Image (tube, rainbow, N blue to C red):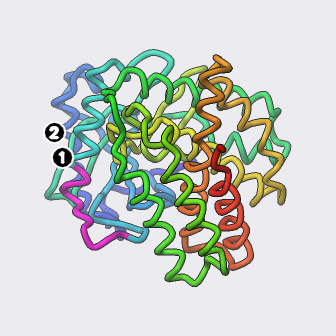
């Protein structure tokens, strides 16, 4: 639930409201099919809970809710090469490409971009997606506040939109082989800095050596992926699913990049909230069946996906708010999957 705040009240986390409101009025004028042609739009700022990697703003333009991400206002860890303007431009271009390829209507949608402004903390404005996040469906199923059927439905829709992204967006004959191991090693090195590998160095490197020699991993066809397919980046409402935060969407990636992310996060949520990651297995299996009904093709996916589940587990483990025992659990599960190289 969000509450209006006065337009004159200074936003302590974002840029000056006067500049933002002026920009939003211009965006309303440039998008008459959404906001009409009235010209006297009433704009209201809303309080937004800050749970993502950037400061976010929420606004109403004549009753239509807008979301603004400020790339220059980061909340999480960024690397030395992070360039807020480049990140803003990349996500905007990606969103416009999704729109061009038909993701702005129908059952499977990617949230619509309205505009960008490099002068206002590298801001990206999009329409706001109403509905329940897949994250909330998982937590509600664990806590018994919803039927598991609601989570199964949400996973089917998530599988459907990922399949459509992988099918309708640009594809290639090969994947970026260097990126496979770069992403994996990036998390490993950070965990090493945290002294969190707990003697698993040899096991995980043995697994990496075996995966490096596993030809099907390296000979996959490339697809465009969402790139950050964690459950908080999907919202479901009335049988429609919306994908958010596609700033990491890239071509020439394995489709298991997204599938492994969803599977790893399901295990993580059940391990964290229900104290039993194994309870996620029926939901993971349902998700993979919904993505690929054909048994033979699903078998190929299941051969490769442990690598990407391991990669995503390590990425989750790098987050700064776990206690040592839970981070150890995540690392141990990642190492276990790293060793599941088909023979």
Above or below, comparing residue 26 to residue 213 in the picture? above
User: Which residue range is magenta in the image?
Assistant: 78-88
Q: Do callouts 2 and 1 mark residues in contact (Cβ within 8 Å)?
A: yes
Front residue of 209 and 184: 209
Q: Is residue 79 in the magenta section?
A: yes
Residue at disc 1, secondary structure: helix
Which numbered marker is on residue 246? none
**Residue 311 in which image quadrant:** bottom right
> Residue 119, how many percent across, how many down?
14, 58
Front residue of 299 and 3: 299
Q: Residue at point 42% right, 27% down?
A: 165
Q: Is residue 205 in the magenta section?
A: no
Front residue of 27 and 323: 323
**With 329 as the anchor, is 308 left or right in this view?**
left
> How far is disc 2 from disc 1 in space, using C-alphas?
5 Å
> Residue 69, how many percent across, how many down?
34, 52
Which residue has dot 2 on it?
26
**With 89 as the anchor, is 130 left or right in this view?**
right
Front residue of 86 and 116: 86
Which residue has dot 1 on it?
23
**Residue 152 in which image quadrant:** top right
Above or below, comparing residue 28 to residue 228 in the picture? above
> Residue 104, how many percent across, how many down?
36, 22
């Amino acid at each position: 639930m969000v509450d209006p705040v006065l337009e004159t009240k200074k936003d302590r986390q974002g840029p000056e409201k006067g500049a933002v409101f002026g920009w939003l009025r211009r965006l309303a004028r440039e998008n008459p099919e959404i906001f009409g042609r009235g010209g006297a739009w009433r704009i209201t700022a809303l309080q937004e809970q800050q749970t993502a990697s950037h400061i976010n703003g929420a606004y109403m333009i004549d009753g239509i809710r807008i979301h603004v991400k400020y790339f220059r206002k980061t909340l999480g860890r960024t690397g030395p090469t992070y360039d807020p303007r480049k990140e803003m431009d990349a996500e905007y271009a990606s969103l416009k490409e999704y729109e061009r390829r038909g993701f702005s209507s129908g059952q499977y949608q990617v949230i619509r971009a309205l505009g960008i402004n490099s002068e206002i903390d590298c801001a990206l404005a999009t329409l706001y997606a109403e509905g329940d996040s897949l994250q909330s469906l998982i937590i509600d199923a664990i806590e018994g506040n919803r039927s598991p059927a609601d989570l199964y439905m949400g996973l089917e829709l998530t599988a459907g939109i990922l399949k459509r992204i992988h099918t309708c967006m640009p594809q290639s004959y090969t994947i970026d082989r260097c990126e496979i191991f770069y992403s994996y090693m990036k998390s490993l090195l950070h965990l090493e800095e945290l002294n969190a590998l707990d003697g698993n160095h040899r096991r995980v490197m043995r697994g990496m050596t075996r995966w490096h020699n596993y030809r099907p991993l390296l000979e996959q066809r490339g697809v465009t992926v969402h790139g950050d397919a964690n459950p908080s980046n999907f919202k479901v409402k009335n049988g429609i699913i919306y994908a958010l935060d596609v700033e990491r969407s890239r071509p020439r990636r394995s489709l298991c990049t997204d599938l492994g992310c969803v599977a790893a996060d399901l295990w993580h949520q059940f391990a964290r909230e229900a104290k039993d990651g194994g309870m996620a297995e029926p939901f993971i299996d349902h998700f993979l069946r919904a993505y690929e009904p054909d048994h033979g093709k699903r078998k190929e996916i299941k051969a490769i996906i442990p690598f990407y589940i391991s990669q995503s587990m390590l990425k989750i483990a790098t987050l700064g708010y776990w206690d040592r025992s839970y981070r150890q659990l995540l690392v141990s599960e990642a190492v276990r999957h790293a060793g599941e190289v088909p023979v």
